[in-house]
Image: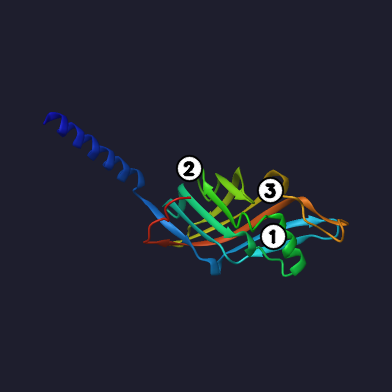
Amino acid sequence: MMKNLKFYTLVFSALTFMAVAVNGQDVYKLQPQNSKLTVVGTSTVHDWEVETKEFNAETNLQVNQNSVSQVSRVLFTTPAESLKSGKRLMDSKIQEALKTKKHPEIKFSLKENEAINGEKGTISGLLTIAGETKEVDVTVNFDAQNPGRLGVKGELPLKMSDFNIDQPTAMMGTIKTGDEVVVKFDLEFLRSSEELTRGN
């Protein structure tokens, strides 16, 4: 009897600790219609830019006095084929380089809880592109001035070669894109009563 009592006490204590750990954390879900994500790069001829209008993101974080104090979870996904430049040939080259038939999704997830001090912070996460997963550090600016709304803005420099992506070429190789690209994002989230999606 005493052993059972101790067991139930331990379970209750663990549940109480978990409840306290998530207390004050809210779920925020992306509003795609008010968000923008682009990738910009260079080539031997001119700079280029692609944009996606199909992406989903959600986060679990804590806001204190109109300021983000902790981020405990981030999930971001976008179909690789949704990256468009408006030029059919270039889009085809990009999809080929990203191996979209074999790896149709680009994903980012938070590696571990991040404490944020103020309106700017760096979060570490796992980014998967073309089937390759790398750890990246993303510096972001938060705007939590409006209750229930969260703005997230930032840039992430990347190298295609880090993800084993061959630089797209055209005109028999006479036009070649640069290895370095920059992902730029300006996202809007709204506080949600729904739970986070399970899994990463």
Residue that label 1 marks: 95
- Give coordinates of residue 6: x percent, y percent: 18, 31
Above/below status of 138 relative to 87:
above
Q: Name the residue under label 2.
A: 115
x, y percent for residue 123: 54, 45
- Secondary structure of the residue carrying numbered label 2: strand
Comparing marks 2 and 3, which lies closer to the viewer?
3
Q: How crowded is mark 1: few (under 14 residues within 10 Å), some or many (20 or more)?
A: some
Question: Depth check: 161 or 48 in front?
Answer: 161
The structure residue drawn at horizontal position 51% and vertical position 43%, both measured from the top left corner, is: 111
Q: How far apart are marks 2 and 3 (CA)?
A: 24 Å
The residue type indicated by label 2 comes to: Ala
Q: Which of marks 3 and 1 is nearer the N terminus?
A: 1
Label 1, label 2: how far apart the Cα atoms are: 36 Å
Dot 3 crowding, Cα within 10 Å, few <14, some 14–19, many 20+: some
Callout in the foreground (3, 1)? 1
From the image, tell me which residue sits under label 3.
158
Residue furthest to the top in view is 2
Q: Tell me if label 2 and label 3 are in contact, CB under 8 Å.
A: no
Q: Marks 1 and 2: which is nearer the front?
A: 1
Q: Is residue 65 left or right of residue 181?
A: left
